[in-house]
Structure formats: C-alpha cells, structure tokens
Image (cartoon, rainbow, N blue to C red):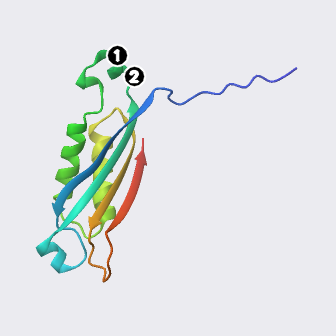
Amino acid sequence: MCPIVFIFAKNLNVGSIKIKNIKVFAYHGCLDEEGKIGSDYRVDLKVKGDLSLSAKTDALKDTIDYVHLNKIVKEEMAIRSKLLETVAERILNRVLDELLIVQKATVDVSKINPPIGGNVQMVTVRRSKSR
C-alpha cells in the first residue's frame, strides 16, 4: 500500500508591495559630525501579505496601506541611531506591529555618499523579518 502524502501551502494568496527610493535626510552614524551635519538616505521597503481580499473589495482597509508604510519609515529615520541596522530593525518592528496583514517585511537602509574615505555611492544594510 502506498502512503498518502499531503502538502499544505502556507499561503497561496501572498502578494507584495514595494516602496522604492524613499528619500530622507537624517543624522545617523557613529561620528559626532554625522549627528551634526546629517546625510542623505534612501530606504526601500518590501512587504508581503495576503492581498486577495483587497483585490475583491477594492477597499483600503483590506490591504497594506503604503501611505502608512511611508510614514513609519520617515518617523523611524528621524530618530538618530549610530547604526543603520538599528534603524532597519525599528522600521521592521513597527511594520509588523502596526500592520497585521503583513507576514514578511524586508527593508534596505542606504546612506548616500558615506564618509568612509573613498568614492562610494552608498552603503546599504538589508534586514528582513517574518511573523
């Protein structure tokens, strides 16, 4: 007799929303000068969740509101941190705390023209978190 194998898909209705190139001026960094003069940053955010209900209802309340995502990014980028990893972690925590439909979030926080003694366009920290 052959065994019966069941394979369960975790969520077949997963969709994603990406916000690319959120431009922010902020004061992150380990150097005292970075806290005084600030720097340009770029943030990219990708979230995944079940978007099937909103596809049917056409209602903002049933989806992942990218205006809310952008607000979280801007508010967390305004809080000074020494490390980009810390800022990225705060963004991810708020996204998962405030938007229950989000199952996974990935954020890239990039410092434009970092003061590292060379001709470098940007340095990026990427972090991801899931429920």
Q: Height in image: 122 above or below 88?
A: below
Looking at the rendered structure, which numbered label has been put on residue 3?
Answer: none
Residue 37 horizontal side relative to residue 54, left or right:
left
Q: Which residue is mark 1?
A: 56
Residue at 35% x, 52% y is: 107
Residue 2 horizontal side relative to residue 110, left or right:
right
Outermost residue on the left side: it is 36
Outermost residue on the bottom side: it is 117
Residue at 22% x, 68% y is: 28
Q: Which residue is mark 2?
A: 52
Which of the 4 quarters of the picture holds residue 54? top left
Residue 69 horizontal side relative to residue 49, left or right:
left
Q: Position of residue 113 (x, y in %)?
A: 26, 71
Q: Would you say the residues marked 1 and 2 are in contact, meaning their CB atoms lie under 8 Å apart?
A: yes
Is 32 or 97 nearer to us in this picture? Answer: 32
Label 2, residues with CA under 10 Å away: few <14, some 14-19, many ≥20: some
